[in-house]
Amino acid sequence: MKTTENVSNKMGSVPMNRLVFTMGVPMILSMVLQAFYNIVDSYFVSCMTDPAVPNLGDYAVNALTLAFPIQMLIVAIGVGTGVGTNALLSRNLGEGNREKSSRISGNSIFLSCCTYAVFLLFGLFGVGIYIRSQTSDALVIELASSYLRICSVLSFGCVVYMIYEKLLQATGCTMLATVAQVSGVVVNIILDPIMIFGWFGCPTMGVDGAAYATVIGQFTSLLLGFLFHTAANRKYFDTSLRYLAPQRSIIQEIYQIGIPAIIMQALMSFMTYGVNIVLGSLSTAAVTAYGIYYKIQQFVFFAAFGMNNAMIPIISYNFGRRDKTRVDSGIRYGMLYTLVILGAGAVALQVFAHQLIGIFAVSEEARQLCIYAIRIITPGYLFAGANIAFQGIFQAFGCGVQSLVLSLIRLIVVALPLAWLFTRLPNAELLVWSAFPIAEGAGLVCALVLMRRIGRRVAVFLAGGAEQAAAAE
């Protein structure tokens, strides 16, 4: 692990263009790998066939799309808890407080077990109600309920691994965390066709096979994460089971940092759930198309979120030092790199739309709708890139409420009502996709207004007047 002094020298002295890039790449890789779990399942189930059920692949992808918001919610709570753990643990490690660091580690694992208990209960008792709230198609309800029940009841690997990942990152063992995550993805990719189609003597399980392949991959990551954690982190803090005993003060400190991150991640889940309901009023093909598009889009957006995660500590550190030059430089390069990621992603999706959608064995109607979605939504990616960067900037300045407001504007307040309105107009299956770039444009206007207000307080603080900054707020 790097010492606090070395980290400080790095954050305060390495040229900003290189610093943002080198810190961003590992986080981008981690986020992009997370997207693999979702798109791999969708690809293989789209290839399912049954003479008695025409377009079975469409129904299967539709089922996974309806289950997806809950999977995102599981990740949101896990990531948010991990963010709080990472920040709190890093600070205490820097202070040399081994005892408290040990308790933070143990309490974070305890919290992950509590999170699992919630989704276990949901998997046992709530899946049917949730799926039926989005569709009335009996086959889709059957497929989606079965898939989601398995993913929820066996979500222990997913939830707990995310904590081990953050514990490893907090001690500088980022490569070990990446190895664990890559291993889980590879296992999922290998097992998906075997368990879905019944290869090598395995029973043919269809969408259930996709679910089991996913959770086995997650348990693989968990096992490796646990082994790496106990082997590599014991020199920094005590990893014994006695530290799993909950301590209210530490749990409060973790969630003071983690809850805003949970809420912002969860908004994506709520948006997807709402869009599924809106598009379900049009056709099954529209929901299928959105499911495929959204999972392809994740590769681009998750890369931008990785850059966002790199920006926050860099800007925050130099803001604390009142180094205006490096704060401005961090904002400039963070924004630039995020826009490059989203711009390159938009171009790639526009150019290779047919080839990307052609990978999925879905109906021609769903394929065409998905291509329309790409054509209409991706021009708004530059707006989205700026919004994602601004959210990171606001968080770095301690303006979590403003970051949350921006998320609400771009994901919920504008996108969902507008999508619903467009479904009531002629050519709704084409027009509905316009709601997303319009929402990102509205979000950018909001971000610029908020940034102007925040910027005045930041300028006062950087000039040395902390009391004046507080008064201006």
Image: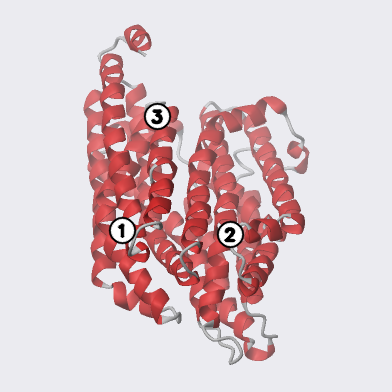
The Cα–Cα distance between marks 2 and 3, rounded to whole angstroms, is: 31 Å
Compared across the picture, whether 442 is left or right of 234 comes to: left
Element at badge 1? helix
Within 10 Å of disc 1 (Cα), the crowding (few <14, some 14-19, many 20+) is: many
Identity of the amino acid at label 1?
Ile
> As rendered, which of 464 and 438 lies closer to the eye?
438
Say whether disc 1 or disc 3 marks the residue closer to the N-terminus: 1
Which numbered marker is on residue 377? Answer: 1
Percent of width and height locating residue 174 = 48, 51
Whether residue 29 is visible here, answered yes or no, is: yes
Please tell me which residue is depicted at 35% across the width and 75% down the height of the picture. 368
> As rendered, which of 129 and 420 lies closer to the eye?
420
- The residue beneath circle 3 is 402
Compared across the picture, whether 269 is left or right of 356 comes to: right
Percent of width and height locating residue 190 = 56, 78
Percent of width and height locating residue 100 = 65, 29
Say whether disc 2 or disc 3 marks the residue closer to the N-terminus: 2
- The residue beneath circle 2 is 134
Identity of the amino acid at label 2?
Gln
